[in-house]
């Protein structure tokens, strides 16, 4: 074969046909995978298995771990992270990232808390807090989608802006005198269902799931439905897979990316209002560091930092896994400062698993490095 001779001319026709058939067979094989097979291949499924094994082991090691009261605490603690993870998943699918969610939580809590201290009705206060959060999301979405700035830069800026506004508006003080609607606000954040006997019908062994948990369940079901049955989600995944190709096929890329950041701020606002009701107070430091926990949970649950993939189930199971790890460390008597090391290790492991499933294996990368051929 001469250097200028096309590969197709030098290669026998039979071999070409064989390669064509192999490629077609690969595509057909992917298309013919059942829902169960795709579920088994997902990272979220194996994280769920690891979570189950960890729960069983910790219950055997420390019986108090599996008590209904501890399960109640775990589900209440991870639910706000999972709620925010649903919004973060939508952003990650587009190939972006939202670093401002923790600061948006603080701003929303302060805005709602201020109106409550001014004796405004709870729904007015909550509505104002929600609007403040949506404004932050609209700011992020506008500069990312329509101006074309990197999401990392825009949301990092909003992280500082929202936190600074929260400090200024609160006068750097805790807000807790919520006026006549304070009992309603606390009831929203502290509600549980089902209630155990004798106040309710649930037996003593059944956990009392918080309002945070039930809001998370409802939102996860809604987002899961979107991801599987709507054209909006198909456009969302198309943007994450290849934004230029999606734009050429008529997908309203800018509008959908804008909506993704607004939805991320919406979920952060909902989580903030629930925590406001649970604690009965508003502090400008609410949500500090939560952006890292939310991103960690979504990545561990299988969302791709490169865009194009993510699930509602993964956002929930990733958040649950992190909280169980934290709770298990405390139960085992291990210094809680080690939690960051465990979380960091799991993030790296999750990304490696994602590379394996996307066809870019760690083994192939290492072989390329040692052979001088970078893949």
Image (cartoon, helix red, strand yellow):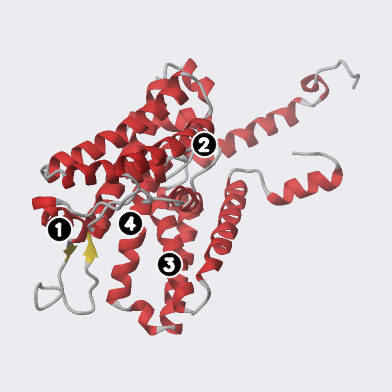
Q: Earlier in the sequence, mark 4 or mark 2?
A: 4
**Which residue corresponds to mark 3?**
324
Q: Residue at x 22, y 69 (%)?
A: 208
Q: Which of marks 1 and 2 is nearer the N terminus?
A: 1
Q: SS at mark 3?
A: helix
**Which residue corresponds to mark 4?**
79
Q: In which quarter of the image is the N terminus?
A: top right
**Which residue corresponds to mark 2?**
307
State which mark lies toward you, 1 or 2.
Answer: 1
When the figure is inspected, residue 267 is found, relative to residue 239, above or below; the finding is below
State which mark lies toward you, 1 or 4.
Answer: 1
Q: Please tell me which residue lies in front, 106 or 179.
A: 179
Q: How far apart are the alpha carbons under marks 2 and 3?
A: 27 Å
Q: How far apart are the alpha carbons under marks 3 and 4?
A: 12 Å
Q: Which of marks 2 and 3 is nearer the N terminus?
A: 2
**Which residue corresponds to mark 1?**
187
Label 1 Cα crowd, 10 Å radius (few <14 / some 14-19 / many 20+) = some
């Amino acid at each position: 074969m001469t250097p200028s001779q096309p590969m197709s001319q030098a290669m026998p026709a039979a071999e070409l046909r064989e390669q064509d058939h192999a490629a077609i067979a690969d595509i057909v094989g992917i298309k013919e995978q059942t829902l169960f097979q795709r579920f088994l291949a997902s990272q979220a499924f194996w994280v769920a298995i690891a979570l189950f094994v960890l729960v069983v082991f910790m219950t055997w090691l420390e019986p108090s771990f599996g008590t209904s009261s501890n399960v109640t605490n775990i589900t209440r603690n991870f639910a706000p992270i999972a709620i925010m993870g649903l919004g973060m998943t939508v952003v990650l699918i587009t190939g972006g990232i939202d670093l401002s969610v923790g600061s948006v939580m603080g701003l929303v809590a302060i805005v709602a808390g201020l109106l409550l201290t001014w004796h405004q009705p709870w729904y007015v206060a909550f509505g104002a807090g929600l609007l403040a959060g949506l404004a932050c999301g609209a700011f992020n979405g506008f500069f990312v989608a329509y101006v074309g700035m990197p999401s990392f830069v825009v949301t990092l800026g909003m992280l500082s802006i929202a936190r600074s506004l929260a400090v200024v508006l609160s006068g750097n003080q805790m807000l807790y005198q919520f006026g006549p609607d304070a009992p309603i606000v606390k009831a929203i954040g502290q509600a549980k269902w089902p209630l155990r006997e004798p106040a309710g019908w649930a037996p003593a062994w059944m956990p009392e799931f918080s309002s945070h948990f039930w809001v998370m369940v409802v939102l996860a079901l809604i987002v899961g439905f979107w991801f599987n049955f709507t054209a909006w989600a198909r456009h969302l995944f198309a943007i994450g897979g290849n934004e230029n190709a999606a734009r050429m096929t008529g997908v309203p890329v800018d509008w959908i990316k804008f909506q993704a950041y607004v939805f991320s701020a919406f979920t952060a606002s909902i989580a903030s209002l629930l925590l406001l009701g649970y604690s009965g107070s508003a502090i400008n430091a609410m949500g500090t560091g939560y952006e890292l926990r939310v991103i960690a949970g979504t990545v561990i649950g299988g969302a791709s930092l490169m865009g194009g993939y993510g699930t509602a189930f993964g956002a929930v199971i990733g958040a649950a896994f992190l909280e169980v790890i934290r709770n298990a460390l405390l139960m085992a008597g291990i210094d809680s400062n080690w939690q960051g090391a465990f979380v960091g290790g799991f993030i790296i492991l999750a990304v490696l698993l994602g590379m394996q499933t996307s066809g870019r294996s760690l083994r192939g990368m290492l072989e390329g490095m040692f052979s001088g051929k970078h893949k």
